[in-house]
Structures are given as C-alpha cells and as structure tokens.
Image: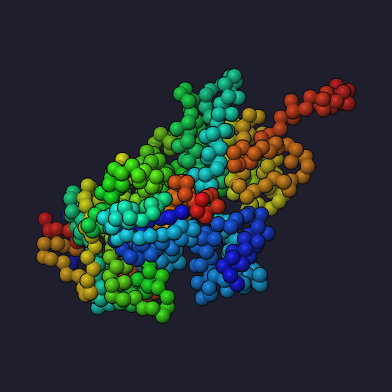
Amino acid sequence: MSTVSQERYDAPTLDDVAFVVDEVWRSLLGDEEGLDRLDHPGHALDHRVGTWTGAVSVTGEWRATVTVELGADAAGPLAARMLALPDDEPPTDADIADAVGELVNMVGGNVKSLMPGPSALSLPLVAAGRAAHPSELVEVTRLDAAWHDRAVRFTVAIPRH
Amino acid sequence: MRAMIIDDSRAMRSILRRIVTGLDFEAVEAGHGQEALDHLASGPVPDVCLVDWNMPVMDGYTFITKVRENPDWRGIALMMVTTESEQRQIVRALAAGAHEYVIKPFTPDAIAEKLEILGLVGAAGGAA
Amino acid sequence: MSPNDTFAQVSALIRRETSMVYDEGKEYLVSARLTPLANALGLTVPDYVRRLPIDPVEKRKVVDALTINETSWFRDHSPYQAFTDHLLPSILEARATMPGPRLLRVWSAACSSGQEAYSIAMLCEESLPDGWDYEIVATDISGEMVERVRAGRYSQVEVNRGLPATRLVGYFQRDGRDWQIADRLRERVRAQQANLAEPYVGLGRFDLVLLRNVLIYFEPRTKQDILRRMLPMVAPHGYLLLGSAETTLDLPPDLAASWRRDQVGRVQTHRPVDLGTASTPTTTHRLTATGA
C-alpha cells in the first residue's frame, strides 16, 4: 500500500482527516482524551493496529472507502467507554464491532461532507483483522495516531484513475 | 417526557440514552426506522424521536416522511442526529418534516440545547 | 454523599465565588464539566467535590470550568425572546418620532467568538421592519476573538450548539469543514478590540447593550466603574442586559439609582435614568438652591 500524491486525486488532506477524527474522538471519549497524531510512524505501527477494522464506502460524485484500524488494546476500551460498561464487564466482540462501526461512520460521514457531492454513505462494515484494499483502490490519505500509546489508523482510499 | 432513540449503533443509542435520561426523559430504543414505526404503532407515543439517517431496513429520512404522513403522530418532535452534514441533506430533512438537526459528532450540551429549542427541556436543564 | 449533595455543594461553591446560580436541573452540566477534572486526579466526582473545600487550586479550576464564557447561539434563550417580543418593539416605538437614520445599534460587549452578536443579527434580519437597518458593534479584549468574529467561520461542533437548524441553513454556507456566516450579516457586525475596564472611545450610543456573563470576572470596584461608564452608552430609550445570574443589587446607592431595573418577560433590563427629566421637582429644587 503506498501513499500517492494528493494533487492527482480527489482526496481529503491529512489535516482535514485529522481535524474530523479529533472532533469525533473527543465527542465520544471526552475533551481530555485527545488522539496524538504521529507524523512519521512508518511501518512500525502496522502490527499494532491490525486487530479490528471498520470501513464505510462513499458512492456518488465522490467515491472512496474510509477505514479505521485499531488494536484490541484501543478497540476494547473505546467500546467500553461508548457503551458505559462497568469495569468488571469486558466488551464482547459484538460490542467492539458496534463501537468501531459507529466510529468509522462518524469519520466517514464528515469526510464525505468535505468532498464534492452529492454522495451516499454506506452502512459500516466491521471485521477482525487488517484492512486490505481491493486492487482498484489506492490509498490517498493516512492518519496514524496514538491514544494513550495505543495505535489507531485512519485511511482514505479512492478508485484508481 | 419520553424520547425514542433510533440508531443502528447500540453504542450511539447508549450515549444518547445517557444524555436524555440525565434530562429526566424516559428512553426507548429502536435499531432502524421500521422498528421505530412498530414501536409507535403499538406503544405510547414519544414526545421526541432522535433519528439517525443511515440505518438498515429503513433509513431515518424515510422514517420521518412516514411519521409525517400519519396525523396521529403530528405531536412528535423529530430531531435528526446524524453524521450526514452537507447543507443539502439538512435542507432535505427539514423539508421532509424534521424539526431539528444535530450533526455527529456532538457534545451532550448540544443535544440538551436542541431539546430546549424544541421546548422539551426547561431553561434550567431538566425535562419541561 | 448522594448525587444531590454533591450538586448542592458545587452549586453553593459557585454561588459563593461568583454570585452565579446553578439551579437544580443543571446537574448534567456540572457532571459534564467536573468529570474531566476528577478523572485527572483519578477520583470520582463525589470524592473530588468532597476535596474542594481544602484544595484552593482545584476549587479555582471548578469555578473556571463552570463559568467559562460559553459560546452557544441564542444562549439562555430568554434575552433573545425578550429582544424580539418586548425590547425591539419598545425601541422602535420610541424612535418612531425621533429624527436620525433608521439604524438600530447594538453593542455585544465581551463578544467572545461572536455567537451573541450574530444571534442578534439573525433576529434583526427577521424582525426589523422595512426601511430599518442595523449595526452590531462586537468588542472583546482578545484580538484573536475579534479576528474570529470578523471571519464569521464556525466549526461543525460550534454550529451544533443552540443554533436552530432552520437558521443554520438560512444564514450559513458550508465551506470545507467550517460553516461561513452570510456576508449580509458579517457586513453588519463590526468587531473591534476593547478592554471594558478602559474608556469607551468612538463607539457611539446604543439602543441595546449586551453585557452578559462578563462582570463576574471583575473586582467589585471595576464592575461599578464599568456600570457607571455604561450609562452614557445606552440611549435613554435603550436597554442594558446583564447575564441572568448577574445583579446590580450590590451597587452603591447613587449608581444603583442611575439604573432603572424592569422585569421584561423572563429577563431583567436596565435603563439609564434620565436625570434631566426623571424627576422634575428635584431639578427645580436644585436650580433654586444654586441660585441660577
């Protein structure tokens, strides 16, 4: 997966994605729970974000897939917080899938609104494992971030021209 | 006061439930528009519906148009709570009969203030 | 400690420190603001509140968290309702027989990021009769805030706060991740930097001055000085509005007598007492006494 020059494609900027993600994250977890943006993490994060993946697709005037990948160490506490689970009740896989789905829905919907429209947003798909874009998609924006040292990655991929 | 929370995400319903029960609302939940219509047909009619847009089975936009077709449900305030945030979408929802519109992400205060605009929460913060 | 006791204790603290009143029903707000502070120390909110009486640093933080100038649209509702229903009709009636341009002038003092100024601008758009225009002077001590008001751009999170959806789509255009207020309103809101504790120069006189939730930040003497210098800024037919929890009851007698307080709808208004005409016998007596 390579990041290509954004001028060639209809892609949101990294700043736009970071801004959207920050607002979503704070609204779900509180103002004190910001995400720290990691500017040049390279591939070091790859193995740490691979447990849960959520994706929404945008179709219409703008076409893209918006993805979040995160490790169990981030996805579990995220779900527990969103569902307000008591400390002695760990989130189930269904809880985590639901929370990750809502996270990527909110990020995807807000990214969509920054791009040319009208476009429609799909329902979120959540799966255990890494995201693998089909070959007709190319990743154009990637935001790597850390939440209490736990890795979270957001990507936007669009069709190859 | 009674609120119906209609969203396909349990996590989002849980967040909204905590906010509205904190404002002294009773809350019922539905996972999509059709389930919400079934609740409306069988149960007590809520004062307000908090409605997501993108949901399986029946989306929030369709739900709003269905509610507006039934004169018995004229008294229900309809508030979209959705990540759909283009101006065009907001105008569409208002034209279809939504009274208010909250864009995700939101803060708890934002929900309370919109309920206040709808006259469902007193200025002091509790349900009117 | 029950949640009620916790709230009562916080409410009493805020009232003591700021004269602001947090009524029952604001529990959600108190809990939302205090949870981050409590979490930062690894405490529950009740445990945190129990500690406040012996911890002045945390006490200060609580006061700041609960009094920070909020930036909601149409904040508190009542003043805006009173403006449309009572104040504006009364001002227009008084001015019907006066010479001068048909321009309504409003001062949003301590305007922060401009939500109050633009909220009033929206009401002027909707309620001013044909042939009338309006000008809103928005001042703040912060140059950054003044720039924000001039730009008239607000984030998604900001436009969620108290702004009715019909007005969002009516007065704003989505622009990237922000919402841009309409040029028509932006041209009528004049933002400039000003410190309320310093002389008011070149502002002119106003039909309405909004000085809401800002006096609480000043020492009593400064507060009195501000209210004294506000007198000539408000036209005789005009109004001064303070925050709902702010009061002028603790003013020295002469200053208190210079402002007439009226309950209008759910808000208390202040109007300058016109010393020239307020009490004819006193005026006559004075003239006699000085032998003029």
For residue C46, above or below residue C93: below
User: At x 21% / y 73%, what residue is drawn?
Assistant: A130
Return the residue nearer the eye: C248 or C200: C248
Picture quadrant where residue A33 is located: bottom left
Picture quadrant where residue C226 is located: top right
User: At x 41% / y 66%, what residue is drawn?
Assistant: A29
User: At x 74% / y 28%, what residue is drawn?
Assistant: C278
Residue B76 appears in the rendering: yes
For residue C61, above or below residue C103: below
Residue C52 x/y as whole percent: 62, 70
Q: Residue furthest front?
A: B42
Colour approach in the figure: rainbow
Return the residue nearer the eye: C20 or A32: C20
**Left or right placement of residue B102 versus residue C289 in this view:** left
User: At x 35% / y 66%, what residue is drawn?
Assistant: B11
Residue C147 appears in the rendering: no
Q: Residue furthest bottom?
A: A88
The quarter of the rendered structure image containing the N terminus of chain A is: bottom left
The quarter of the rendered structure image containing the C terminus of chain A is: bottom left
Q: How many marks?
A: 0
For residue C64, above or below residue C144: below
Return the residue nearer the eye: B14 or B71: B71
